[in-house]
Every structure is written in structure tokens, then in C-alpha cells.
Amino acid sequence: MLLNDFYKNAIEGTYVIPQYSGLSIANIASTILKHYGIATTPLPPLNNEIFSDVMLNKSNIIFIVLDGLGYNFFSEFVKKYKKSYEMFPVTSVFPSTTASALPSMFTGCSPSMHGMIGYTMLLPSSGTAYNMLTMTPVNSGRVNQPINKHKLNGFINVKTIFQMLSEHGVRSVTFNREGLVDTSLSSMLYRGSHLIGYSALSDMFLNAKKIIENMESHRWFITIYYDRIDAIFHQYGVDNDMASREVKSFLSQFYDLLISKLSSIIKDNTMVIITGDHGHVPFFRDKILIYNNTGMDNYMRMPPTGDPRALFLHTTAENEPIISELLKRYTPFRYLMMEKKDTVTLFGPEPYHKEFYSRIGDYLLVPDFGGSYHVQGISHGNHYMKAGHGGMDINEMIVPLVYSFLNDFI
């Protein structure tokens, strides 16, 4: 699969769509489950051209998710530092944002199936929009009142990969940044895994080493989630050397503090998979639409939800001509506008989450490269971020999939 192949089915030749049939991050979970001899998820495993069965003849897997790691960025990193990783391009999900991508990775379901369809999302059962990362109501002032963990048991109405692994005797441990461990989102995403917080790469890799050595005689699955690369892109933009340095530091410490310290028996029996949840595009200062300045709110049932680069409008067909005219008047960039019925396949196939259709809004707006929407009180600062994601540009939609036997990793 070549990068340009993803343009073949792109909307208007530009807007890359997710490939849920075997070329997306949502297919990774089925691949992993298949490796352990477990029935796969509703989505199929990765295509054989990416992951042949012979690559999965190791007992154990270390699965690394580097938040914000785009394919184009990582390709340049590999060239710069002369690495020789086995790497393939795969798509993110839609929207190409963490709140939708991580549930897909950890359930093997598309957003249409697990129901997490954006950074901010309407929950029809409550009539309120919620921030899906903090699990708090938007514009309510209740920023410290997330959805109760116990009420989240049925929020994603599918099992996690960790639960399925545990049911079949595979021990699962997940490392996440300390500040993210005791959150409602983590309790939902990592059900079935033993969750361990870390404050730095050093303690994370050293603790991972101890745990792996204690599980040597068992089948195990280690997940590492690292979000600092994403934060660097948001703060400093896509044209900086800091993100490359951060990736270099991560991979170097991964080798020095973990791989090199493990016994040859463990290394011979383990493979590593590395991927990202999405990439980034720049946020240009002259390509921001301030929604609140357009007058569109007069024709909406409620404020927009979604992401700065994938905005859901909650309105009626009667208002569409007025909204279209306002968009033409105020939008400083090219954009894609789609009716609900035409957006469904972007989120994935059936079976749909019971509230999926009512969560996605009546119209979808996706800006082109560099464009973004800002909705005061909802977008949470995207107007000062220098880069972002959520849309369908190839730089945010395509991520790398890297795999290696642990004893071959460099």
C-alpha cells in the first residue's frame, strides 16, 4: 500500500476517508486478538499485505500508541535518523481525533459502533453536549464534575480488547501518564487491563521491565500510551524539531531502559507494534472561522459539537440555505459540507451504537488544509493552538504502523 493509494477513494480527491475494511487503526485490535487465538471484533484484522500471519508467531506483544504520530512526520523522522523500521500507512478513524481513535483501537470497533464520535459530543439521553476527553458537560460550569465512572459501564456498549484478552488468560497491563490514570475516560477505555501511571519515560520503561520479567512464564500484552508528541504539535506547530527530538528520546529510552535489559528468551518471544491515533495539520491564523460571529446560532437547535476540523451542526433542512449562505460569506477556506445521511459511512459500518445517528448532527463541516472552526466555550482554545486534527487531510488521517520482533528492534 502506497500513500497515494488512499487518494483513490478520497472525496473530491482531497478528503481521505477511513479504510475500516482492513487498513485502519480500528483493525489492529482484531489482528492482536487473532494472534492470541481469540475470536475477532466486528471489524476484520489488518490486510495480509500489512500483517501476514507469519508475523504473529510470538507469544507476547508490546503495543505502543504515540498520540499525534502522523505517517508523513514519522517518515521524515526515519529518514533523518536513518532508521529501518518496517512501516506501513494506515488510516485513522473519523473524526481523526483521540476521543474517537483510542476507543476504536481498544475495542476493534469503528466510531459508528462504539459511539464516541468526536471531541465534543451531544448525548441525546441527557440533552447535553459533553467533552469526551474530560467527560464533563460543555458550557455548564461543571468542569470538575465528570460523568460518574460507575455510569460509564454501558457508555461504550462493546468489550475492550483487554477484557477479551483477560477472558482467555492473557495478562494485560497498560501504562498511561499519571494525570490520566484516575479519569472517567481511562476507566472506560482500559477495562480489563491493569492500569499503571508514570511520571516520566524512565520510570515507565523501568517499571515495564519489572512487570514483564514477572510475567515471563505467562502470555501477556503490554500497552503504552504516550501523549507528549501530540502536545508538542498543538503548542509549537508542525514545523518544529521538538516533536522529532521527543520521538527520538522515546525510542532511545525504549531500547536502552527496556529492550536491552530483557532476557534473550523474552525478546525472542515478543514483538512490538507502534502506531499513532492521528497526525496533524497547521492551524493558519487567517483560516479560522469564529462560528459565534456568523449569526448561524440563530438557526441552530444547540451550539455545534465535534472538533475544530469536523464540526457537527444541529439544525433543520429548512435552515440549510441560510446556513450555506452564511458559510460562504464568512468562511476563509475551502470546506466540505455534508448532510447526515451522506456522512454515516465515514464513521464506519453497522451495527451502530444505539445513539449514533442522533449524536452526529444534521450537517457536517470539514475544512481543507489549515482551516479550523472556533466555537466560543466549546473549542477549548483551538484558536491559539498552532496545529490540530480531526478532519480528513492526509496529514491527519494517515498514521504509521510499525512492527518488529523485539530482538530485531533498533
Image (tube, helix red, strand yellow):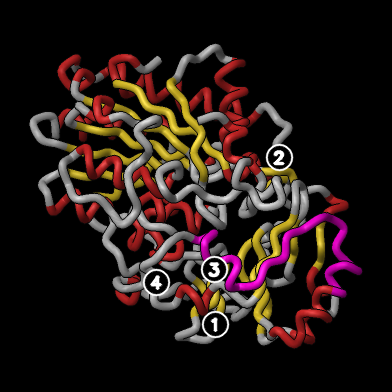
Residue 270 point in image, percent of width and height: 23, 26
Provide the secondary structure element on which disc 1 rests: strand
Three-letter code for the amino acid on which mark 1 is drawn: Thr
The mark that comes first in sequence, 2 or 1, is 1
* Real-space Cα separation, disc 4 to disc 1, in angstroms: 18 Å
Circles 3 and 2: CB atoms closer than 8 Å: no
Provide the secondary structure element on which disc 4 rests: loop
Provide the secondary structure element on which disc 2 rests: helix
Mark 4 or 3: in front is 4
The mark that comes first in sequence, 3 or 2, is 3
Q: Residue at x 33, y 61 (%)?
A: 187
Residue behind mark 2:
236
Mark 2 or 1: in front is 1
Residue behind mark 4:
353
Question: Quick one: 368 or 177, which is closer to the camera?
Answer: 368
Three-letter code for the amino acid on which mark 4 is drawn: His
Residue 3 point in image, percent of width and height: 58, 32
Give neighbour class at mark 3: few <14, some 14-19, many 20+ (Cα, 10 Å). many
Q: Residue at x 47, y 69 (%)?
A: 135
Three-letter code for the amino acid on which mark 2 is drawn: Tyr
* Real-space Cα separation, disc 2 to disc 1, in angstroms: 33 Å
Three-letter code for the amino acid on which mark 3 is drawn: Asn
Residue behind mark 1:
128
Q: Main secondary structure of the magenta part?
A: helix
Residue found farthest to the left: 217
